[in-house]
Image (cartoon, grey):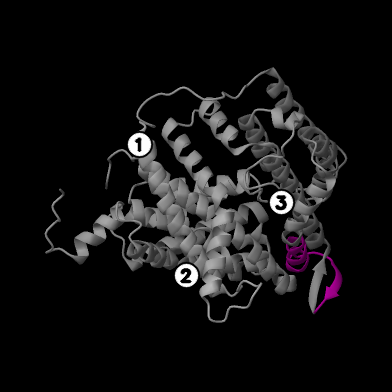
Amino acid sequence: MNRRRISLSELVLLAVLAVVSGFVYWALVQAWIALQIAMGPFGDLAQHVLIGGWMVAAPLALYIVRRPGVGIVVELAAALVEVVFLASPVGPMLLVVGLVQGAGAEAAFALTRYRRYDWGVFVLSGALAGLASTVLGMVRFGWLTQDWFAWRLGLQVASGILLCGIAAKVIGDALARTGVLDNTPLGRARRETTSPDTEPVPVA
Amino acid sequence: MTALGQALPHDSVLHRRNPTVKLAVFFVVSVVVLVPVDPWTPLALLVVAAPAVVHAGRIPWPTLGRAALLFGPFAFSLLAVNAVTRDGPVVAEVLGLEVTRTGLTVGVALALRTVLVGTLAVAFTLTTDGARLMTSLHQHARLGARPTFAVLAGYRVLEDLPGRWTTIRQAQSVRDPRHRRGTLPRDPGSLSRAAFALLVVALRQGERMAIAMETRGLGSGPRTVHRPVALDRRDAVFAALVLGVCLLVVLVTWRAGLLRTWSTV
């Protein structure tokens, strides 16, 4: 586990990640509204199909920065952006949602003491984020006393695995290939694994 | 609506209130309205809140109405799904699904809660400047200097995002062989490619800003604040008034026997 103090550039990277995620989350809300209308009386289930997309920032931030707590911090910041700047109808409760979903996603990485970043950890991260989100929905909307609870749980976990866990790894790798993450722990780790025999280029 | 994170360009009582106090009060009200699941409590709060924010924030009714239309479908879907998925006396049958009295009650309550919180969210955004909020959080909520600078940098990125999004979408559309003049592709593939490009551009901009900030020594020690945000007695009066009215409404519906919670619905 890396205990060095987080640098300003890493904090700015997390803030930018949170802002773009907040913006994309807000765009996802528009897609969600369209899907809700298309699904008629089953519209409320649309949120479970898309829920993973609202949690992807946490595993992505952990993958890039590789420090304890950044998953929760980035989800909280993305929620703050949605509430404060984009007027989310969920209101400040979104901060609690971000906290719970971020903690769920981060739990998988914490179990490996932030040392493993393979597919299995990302799948577990998405599943736990979906599970945490379901527990919160039970408190906020009384899902447990409603029909379709098994559907809600199944869809949330499946969406969490696909649109949160797996998507975070795919997006992180794609971002790294562009070179934009070269100065981050993810960029450095990729350089170490892809070219172990390459001599470092001397700096003039 | 104004640009992202920018308040309406005029002065009002809500514009002048301390942003941290406003956010804290908004949070408490949102937590309080989690308790009732009867339609009367959120309805009464909405009847009080909508004219109050319009008057205190000098927000035009059409502006508030247009924003409310955005979260209308969310509210309606909550009503629809709760109406057909909760046990209770059946009052109607729609598309082979049984609509129950309990489901309708809870559904209307959750829909009204959504409209209420959405109205407050719009009022908060339209009367709060983003940079002033961050300065206030730094001054009054003890948010550290480095996270404050980082979020302010993120806020700057956010301001540019809609413009960058349009530029990227237009650039990708021009290169698309299926390009049709005057229209932008709306398929999920085009949108996700544009979102990825937006993320890359934003991260590059963030990296450049971080280097500029470090070069200027930002975050290396305590700093003074440009344009400090005031926190005075009027903010305390504002908080007491809003929370007092909120609790009064809940008390009245409880005394009138209208208040329902998850355990009594």
Left or right: B229, with A9 as reference point: right
Q: Which residue is mark 3?
A: B262
Q: Residues within 10 Å of mark 1 (few under 14, many from 20)?
A: some
Depth check, front residue: A38 or A10:
A10
Q: Which residue type carries mark 1?
A: Glu
Label 2 – label 1 distance at C-alpha: 37 Å
- Of badges 2 and 1, nearer the viewer stands 1
Note whether B88 is above or below B32 in the view shown. Answer: below
Q: Which residue type carries mark 2?
A: Leu
Note whether B135 is above or below A48 in the view shown. Answer: above
Task: Give the residue at x 70% y 41%.
Answer: B126
Q: Which residues are magenta?
A: B76-95
Q: Secondary structure at mark 1?
A: helix
Q: Residues within 10 Å of mark 2 (few under 14, many from 20)?
A: many
Q: Is residue A204 visible to the viewer in this orientation of the structure?
A: yes
Task: Give the residue at x 81% y 69%.
Answer: B99
- Of badges 3 and 2, nearer the viewer stands 2
What chain is tagged by disc 2? Answer: A
> Where residue A49 appears, x then y in whole percent?
58, 69
Label 3 – label 2 distance at C-alpha: 32 Å
Q: Which residue is mark 1?
A: B214
Q: Is residue B258 magenta?
A: no
Q: Is residue B84 magenta?
A: yes
Q: Which residue is mark 2?
A: A162
Which quadrant would residue A92 be assigned to in this image?
top right
Note whether B157 is above or below B244 in the view shown. Answer: below
